Image (cartoon, rainbow, N blue to C red):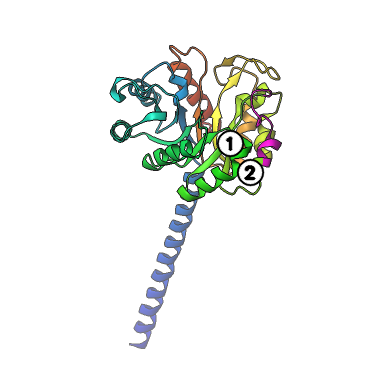
Amino acid sequence: MLKNKIMITLKNHLWYLYFLAVALIGCSGNSKKNENQNADLQMGVALYSFNRFSFADAIEKADSAGVNYVEGFSFHKLGKEFNENSMSSMSEEDIGNMRQMLKKKNIKMQSMYVSGAKNEDDWKYYFELAKKMKMQYLVCEPEKESWDMLDSLAGLYQIKIAIHEHAKGKSIYWHPDSVLKALKNHPNFGVCADLGHWARSGLNPSECLKKLEGHILGVHLKDIHESNNTEAIDVIVGTGVIDFPSVVDELKRQRFNGIVHVECEHKMENNLPDVIEAIRYFEELYNPIK
C-alpha cells in the first residue's frame, strides 16, 4: 500500500513538472511572439502623395496599396463629400464623415502635417481635430517663438508634436542639431524623420536617425536621384542614392515602433504603382524572406 502511494505521488510530481515545463515554453514562445510583433514594421502612406485627388479617392488609393495607416495634411482639398473644405476648415459633420470613410477601409489616421497655423487659436483647432480623429501626433515645422506654447498644448491634449525637416535653406530644422535644440526642455516634442530631405541637404539619413534616437515618432520614406542637392528629384524608393539597408539597420537597432509613411512626390497624377513598389521594397528589406 505504502509503495503504491509513493508511486502515485511520484507520478503526480512528474506530471506537474511536465506541465510546468510546457507552460514555461509557452510563455517563452509568447514573449518571443510579442517581441516580434513589437518589432513589426508598420507601413502607411502620407496622403500628400495623392494631393491631386479628393480625400475619398486618396483613401481608395491608400487602401489599394494595402496599408492600414495614412497621414493627413492640413491643406488637403477634401472634395465634394466635404463641401470642398480642406482639413484646415472642417465642420463636425466633415469630421464624422472622414472617420466613417476611414473606418470602412480599416485605415487609421494617426498623424497630420500642419502648415499655416499662425497663433494659439489656430493650433487649438488642429489639436481639437487631432483629438476627435484620435491622432497620436501633429507633424510641423513651428517657429521658435511658438515652442513653449505648442509644448504646453501638446501636454494638455496628450498629442505629441513631431518636428519635420525640409532641405537646407528651406527649413530651420534641416540639421538634427537644430531639431535637438527644439526638443530641449520640450518633453512633448518628438521627430518626424524625412529621409529624402536629409539626403538633399547632404546628410547621411542613418546617421541623422542615430542622432535623434529616442525621439523619432514617425518616418517619411522617399528616395532622390542625387545627394547634397536641395533640388534633387524624387525617384522610386530603392532606385536612388539613399542607403536603405543602413536605415533599416538603424531603425531596428533603435527598436523603432512608429509608422513609416511613404511620401511619393513624383508622377503625381499616377504614382500609386510607385507607392506600392516603395512599400514592397521597404518591407522586403525590413523583413527579408528566408
* Spatial CA span between label 1 and label 2: 9 Å
Q: Residue at x 46, y 15 (%)?
A: 271
The label number, if any, that marks residue 183 in the structure image: 2
Residue 151, how many percent across, how many down?
A: 56, 46
Residue 84, how many percent across, how many down?
A: 33, 21
Image quarter in which the N terminus is found: bottom left
Q: Residues within 10 Å of mark 2 (few under 14, many from 20)?
A: many
Residue 27, how many percent across, how many down?
A: 45, 58
Q: Nearer the viewer, residue 36 or 206?
A: 206
Q: Nearer the viewer, residue 79 or 67?
A: 79
Write down the region rendered in magenta: 168-181
Q: Is residue 116 visible?
A: yes
269 versus 121 height, above or below: above
Q: Earlier in the sequence, mark 1 or mark 2?
A: 1
Q: Are marks 1 and 2 in contact (CB under 8 Å)?
A: yes
Q: Residue at x 44, y 19 (%)?
A: 51
Q: Which residue is mark 1?
A: 163
Relative horizontal placement of residue 99, taking residue 18 as reference (left or right):
left
